[in-house]
Image (cartoon, helix red, strand yellow):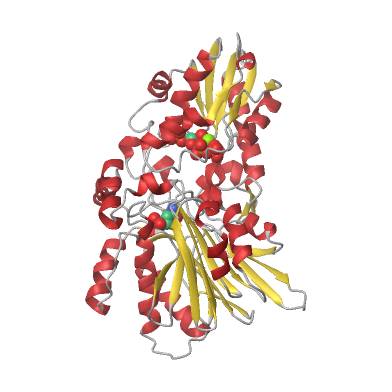
Amino acid sequence: MCGIVGIVSTTNVNQSLYDALTVLQHRGQDAAGIVTFQDDRFYLRKDNGLVRDVFHTRHMRRLVGNVGIGHVRYPTAGSSSSAEAQPFYVNSPYGITLAHNGNLTNADELSRDLFRTDLRHINTNSDSEVLLNVFAHELQKLGKLDPTKDEIFSAVRAVHKRCRGAYAVIAMITGYGIVGFRDPNGIRPACYGERTSEDGRKEYMIASESVALSAAGYSLVRDIAPGEAVYIETDGTLYTQQCAEDPHLYPCIFEHVYFARPDSIIDKVSVYKARLRMGETLAEKVLRDFPDHDIDVVMPIPDTSRTSAMQMAHRLGVKFREGFIKNRYIGRTFIMPGQKMRKKSVRQKLNPIDLEFRGKNVMLVDDSIVRGTTCKEIVQMARDAGARKVYFASAAPPVRYPNVYGIDMPSASELIAHDRTEEEIRDLIGADWLLYQDLEDLVTCVSDVNESIEGWECSVFTGNYVTGDVDDAYLNRLEEMRNDEKRFQSAGAISGDNAIIDLYNDED
Ligand SMILES: O=P(O)(O)OC[C@H]1O[C@H](OP(=O)(O)OP(=O)(O)O)[C@H](O)[C@@H]1O
Ligand SMILES: NC(=O)CC[C@H](N)C(=O)O
Ligand SMILES: [Mg+2]
């Protein structure tokens, strides 16, 4: 679930972009990049690592200019090689760089078409590089020396016609401005905000989540609509246009379950309120199905599930306790590359406070159970800490299907709930009781706020892919290309280094 940001300001944007990427770090931990431009030159710094590791003072000094874009990466295509860090760059036409959140489901076909029609060589396995070259090719075809909003919007229209899958994109056309656009189903989030400079001029920021705007002093104007493009010229003139023929709003529900920050508002829905409601509906399920439950204490699995666990305890009238303490220096495990790193990190990340467990029936609450990496470790840790009984609740339904829209869940066989009943999962994780959120309840938790939301992208729970082009052949290919072993082989192949080892090293 990468994070994207773009700014058109009246002063240097390097620090604002750095700060915004830091606020969006939870969306991608593998790589980070910023590109700015001044006059007809652009300046790029990108590498594997966290924002704080990638950008040193000497890099920031070089990122001059009042316009720029940034990206934090969580790979869903290609490998974890630094060659696939973003933003990507293409020199023709004009010099364009691009940051992408999402995943294209027809990237291979597009890559072949680009070579045949335009002799464009795609140098990595990243779908984002393909997306950039489709946009560039469509802009180039218009043959304008000085592109205007009309050419920009025309190229976005062509992108919608050719690209399939999920994308929230910010592209920067060197010397002209930035354009943000969202796929015709609005699967990935993007919004924009404004602020007024000291000399009274308008400045704009486009970002994956509203929290990035407020952190930089921009006030949220609105979400970019599905299919819509927002083009901002260097002088701060802003244009918008609907570029899709048949847009619909089907946001990814997993943003509210896990990915987004609770202080973000996505498509007018407060993530925080959604998670409070998830705790409420979980509690109501307990009271409905197990009115004589013997839960002594409710505990979150930090960080994401805290909001839901707190509300669940409140609704049940049971103690809420932080029984697990999170190591603040370990990042998000689910978006780490490879099962080995995820497993190791879960045990490093969470540690029990024994006195909260000793002799108690504890209800552990997590936002979701995906591969089971977390819950398998956590249940045993609770028992070792002295719990009498260990119950486990997931604020999301069982995750049974791969994701193809920007969440790296390529292989159904990796998913603990795939082909298993809830009882089988309960036994596998060693819990005395396992409670899942019902999908209808989850949808209710995020609905009834924004009537323009026609439905939710829930394919990980249902196997129904909103873009209608995902078949078994694609899923099998995805599993073949993206399973852990294959991915790490290709990482070395592209960049010649063992990208995973370098992932958290500060190379230079
Ligand atoms: O079943 P799994 O495959 O383990 O995936 C689900 C777990 O991963 C995520 O936590 P993560 O550590 O990524 O982030 P958090 O600190 O925001 O909870 C999520 O919150 C669950 O705890
Ligand atoms: N999580 C994402 O949005 C990934 C973006 C893009 N597909 C990449 O792999 O870099
Ligand atoms: Mg978690």
Whole-percent x and y of residue 405?
41, 53
Q: Residue at x 37, y 59 (%)?
A: 84
Relative to 466, 438 lies left or right: right
Relative to 384, 133 lies left or right: left
Q: Residue furthest bottom?
A: 145
Q: Residue at x 67, y 23 (%)?
A: 321
Whole-percent x and y of residue 33?
49, 61
Look at the image and tell me whether residue 499 can be seen.
yes
Q: Residue at x 29, y 68 (%)?
A: 122
Answer above or below: position of 174 versus 3: below
Image quadrant holding the C terminus, namely bottom left
Q: Residue at x 39, y 70 (%)?
A: 132
Whole-percent x and y of residue 212?
63, 57
Answer above or below: position of 338 versus 130: above
Viewer-proximal residue among 186 and 110: 110
Answer above or below: position of 505 versus 297: below
Q: Would you identify the image quadrant in which residue 308 lies?
A: top right
Answer above or below: position of 425 versus 333: above
Query: Where's ligand 2: which quadrant?
Result: bottom left
Whole-percent x and y of residue 188?
49, 57
Viewer-proximal residue among 505 and 18: 505
Relative to 22, 313 lies left or right: right
Relative to 373, 24 lies left or right: right
Q: Would you identify the image quadrant in which residue 325 lies?
A: top right
